[in-house]
Amino acid sequence: MSAALDTGDRAQAVPARPPGRARRRTDWGRWYTWAVLAWLFAPIAFMVVFSFNDPAGRHNITWQGFTLHWYANAFAYPDLNEAMFNSVTIALLTMVVAGVLGTLLGLALGRFGFRGKQLTNLVMFAAISAPEVVLGAALLSTFLMLNVTTGYWTTVVAHVMFCVSFVAITVRARVITLDPSLEEAARDLGAGPWTTFRLVTLPMLFPAVMAGGLLAFALSIDDYIITTFVSGDVNTFPLWIWGATRVGIPPQVNVMGTLLFAVGLTMAVINVVAARRRA
Amino acid sequence: MASTSTTAPGTPAADTAVPPGPAISLEGVFKSFRSGSGTVHAVDGVDLGVERGEFFSLLGPSGCGKTTTMRMIAGFEEPTAGVVRLNGRDVTGVPANRRDVNMVFQSYALFPHMSVADNVAFGLRRRRVAKDEIRRRVGEMLELVELGHRAGHRPSRLSGGQQQRVALARALVNRPAALLLDEPLGALDLKLRQTMQVELKRIQREVGITFVYVTHDQGEALTMSDRIAVMNNGRVEQLGTPAQVYERPATRFVADFIGTGNLVRGTVRGESGGVWRVEVGDGATALLAELPAALASQGSGAVGSEVDLIVRPEKIRLGTEAPGDGVSAVPGTVAETVYTGAATHYQVDIGGGGTVTVHLQNSSDSALAADRGDRVWLSWPARHSAALPA
């Protein structure tokens, strides 16, 4: 009797909610979102966790115990260090060169109509969508045909080649949404073409340029397939790992991977924060 | 209209001697764009002069060429043919950054990555004005538009009306020979637009700079302008004061575009005492003070010609009895009434296929309340009729 009265009171207090039931309904959308995120980040979490593992044998795949030993001895393998150094410098060069070229390309495609614009779009799309094996093989045969010895610089050229489209597309998207009267306003107020670009266009494009550059860095530093074709006898981080898998991957790989991930994450966060402050 | 300069004698000379003559003049200006298959003549032979210190409007529907005309003055478009002069100097072919005019854009085009003060200082910095002077002039200008307290803010933190005023300050601070405004109030709501109209007019009076104002809103143009150029299909249909354009439309387009124009076909029947009698509707007589120029030259030979009478709806009185002599007197039947708050609009069928719109203020002493189907008399003095050749 009193229970019935209670329910009645509650129903009166919150009339919209049928008593009891709705509160327990599972929010599947939320669970699904977390499931996808977990699935995406599990390998990274695995990598980070096992950089602190103290493995018994050659294979760092079962948890044995916590240690900071690998961080203290992160640079114990000279070959790995060299590969890492190559990867980072190639990625930085790619970021800068592809960033500049991609920005100019994106600006041209977003702003102007010109002969060959559709063709340029097509080539860019092809560069993105073509299988890497095909690109790698094609680049290698090109270098061989031109009698260029493959190595560090051919790798840079190859990376710039496949990254430039990503930067261009990112920048183009931003250019299209820019109000063209912003540049006209600068011209109107006495700024010449170069000053207008420096003071108005570039600052407006900067978030996209930065995002494109980071994308290029990320794509370059972990590229394996194209790099195997064009790197000659130069080793990079992904190539070294692949070579090491046959004998067992040392935990230093996890350490470097973790450090690399931390740097990337930091840059991404800085970019987001800066973009938010600019807006 | 014909005065060569509005600068009063004895006014201290500006930093550079300004030659007499209009601030802006366009001479035989054409502009065509190639579009797909054909060529579009956006501006099709425009001649006009904007006097110094004048508030000049380019008024017309979208696509009439008013914006293209303004962009040619600013230097964003080059004319296909013709000459653009600023203070008498031929500036055709001179790029926008070297022309002494500034523009207020429809989208305001404020630089989002700069503070309000930096936006306003942009033009002065390009001209390498001394830092102290920049700070002083930017401060003064922000005071003028009542935004001194917002100098450090980013434009995105400001309301639409405030952004509009920043755009105005950014252009005016350079003291240009002319300020060009491209539908600057278009994005504001009605209340704010009306406030800004008054505000713009005040600022223009205070700074004394020539304003060229592009708009499709006839109310805005009539309210603010010293003179209006009504444009259609790339041509200037009429150039005159707001009163001239409104009371004496020169073309059918102007009569229709500005306000509500009643266009009634009629036949000239004769003249007495300088007033022409025009037969309209079912044999009713309307009076006309001035024949269209083409007919006036024919004198009494104009009798029998057809004309289109133009009468503004608020000039017409509505009565239940026939009016006395000396005014147009046209009987008709009320076909529709529309209550709009301050006024009531009546559609009156005057026979012969003609319909006349009458606007009556809903003042307390207006006795007449005609309903649909009522027989009424329309009357108006001869001076409120205008006529175009039919």
Image: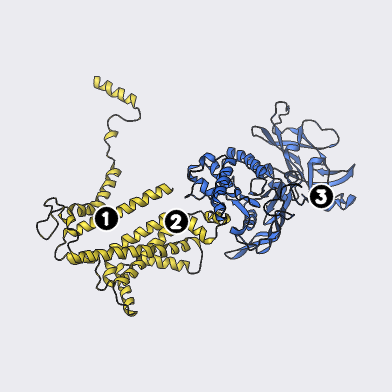
Residue A38 as seen in the image, left or right of residue B384: left
Count every numbered label the image shows and give the total.
3
Secondary structure under the numbered disc 2 in the rendered image: helix
Determine whether label 1 and label 2 are within 8 Å by CB: no
* Amino acid type, callout 3: Pro
Front residue of B272 and B112: B112
Front residue of A138 and B96: B96
Alpha-carbon span between mark 1 and mark 3: 83 Å
Alpha-carbon span between mark 3 and mark 2: 59 Å
For disc 3, the marked residue is B292
Q: Which chain is yellow?
A: A
Q: Residue furthest top?
A: A1
Q: Colour of chain B?
A: blue
The answer to whether dots 3 and 2 both sit on one chain is: no
For disc 1, the marked residue is A261
For disc 2, the marked residue is A205
Structural crowding at the residue carrying mark 2, measured as other residues with C-alpha within 10 Å and reported as few (<14), some (14–19) or many (≥20):
many
Structural crowding at the residue carrying mark 3, measured as other residues with C-alpha within 10 Å and reported as few (<14), some (14–19) or many (≥20):
some
Sequence-wise, which precedes: disc 1 or disc 2? 2
